[in-house]
Image (cartoon, helix red, strand yellow):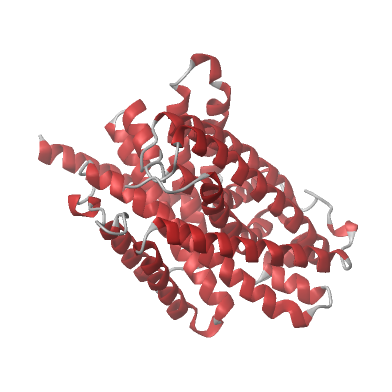
Amino acid sequence: MQRRLGTLDAVVIGLGSMVGAGIFVALGPAAAAAGSGLLIGLAVAAAVAYCNATSTARLAAIYPQSGGSYVYGRERLGPFWGHTAGWCFIVGKTASCAAMALTVGVYAWPQHAHAVAVGAVVALTAVNYAGVQKSALLTRVIVAVVLAVLAAVVVLLAGAAEATRLDIGADAGFWGVLQAAGLLFFAFAGYARIATLGEEVRDPARTIPRAIPIALGIALAVYAVVAVAVLAVLGGGGLATATAPLADAVTAAGHRDLAPVVRAAAAVAALGALLSLVLGVSRTTLAMARDRHLPPALAAVHPRFGGPHRAEVAVGLTVAVLAAFVDVRGAIGFSSFAVLVYYAIANACAWTLQPARRIIPALGLLGCLVLAFTLPLTSVLVGSGVIAVGAALYAARRFTVS
């Protein structure tokens, strides 16, 4: 594939995933788990994400190939761990795609959310099919619009904010804070899109390590400001029950007429996240198909557009089917579990690089495992079952080859 993306493009693709996923989806479930303690959970999730980002950046500089931790696991730990990482990424992020598609539907046309979700998947799959440059350009526009609306929301909420509602952690226990951190991690995982574009960025050894922390830092700043503003208006209990937290907060602050604008921005943000997510999942599918962990036909690259067109279509069809049936909050929990396992493998890979630089990957590995197994029980059980299915497929392939 052709190397067309610079640092700004890579940052925007990662930021498009993170901002769209976190602000409009994950705050509500996190508040249900921890109340106002979600701010503590946000800090924990950010710390784990920082360790993951550092480990991923180091690995991406050494292995600038499509596939992310699938490639790192294969090269550093062996084929099984590479397969497991790739499987976790694909199934976890496919669930994320479905959640983002449904978010578009819920905000844009609640009465027909599933139909809108399927339409959004079809449309954005077509955009990705036409080439990564068009995807990066559209994501840049979406990110600019969403950040402008979020800034306006924070200003509007400032007038109705009450510091007494920010009694951080008073209504949550230790377990609830960890569960909130695990759910909020769903929002920080967008920087993985950058690493999976290893074959399409210019000077990947320099671009990827620079783009990942920049995107993560911007996203964290946005999350913190918006979360504080919404909590100061709705409180932990109000945020936990809000169906559309930012729109509800704007209404509670006395700006009901602006709620539709916020809803429109939420739909646009989810579109940006969905665009980047489909882009990243198709690249990992390409890498696994090249090594025959998935059907080899999915490894084809379009002769004109330069993208993995069959993988993109396959991912788009799968997400469209899921978006017709899944529940948003269930998809978030399952996605968080699978992606945390994925990053646990990435940290284990980084731990093998240099003995003198093992503290961050060790903390990242521990943090990922702790957050994964403090998620809601259903997410843990379903996630463990799906990962077991991936392991069985790997064993079956090894048996067939041998």
Q: Is residue 96 visible?
A: no
Q: Residue at x 65, y 71 (%)?
A: 244
Q: Is residue 346 visible?
A: yes
Residue 123 point in image, percent of width and height: 41, 72
Left or right position of 201 against 228? left
Return the residue nearer the eye: 43 or 14. Answer: 14
Q: Quadrant of residue 199?
A: top left
Residue lying furthest top: 356
Left or right position of 252 against 144? right
Residue 59 point in image, percent of width and height: 45, 31
Residue 45 point in image, percent of width and height: 62, 43
Return the residue nearer the eye: 141 or 401. Answer: 141
Left or right position of 397 against 248? left
Q: Quadrant of the C terminus?
A: top left
Return the residue nearer the eye: 165 or 113. Answer: 113
Q: Residue at x 48, y 57 (%)?
A: 136
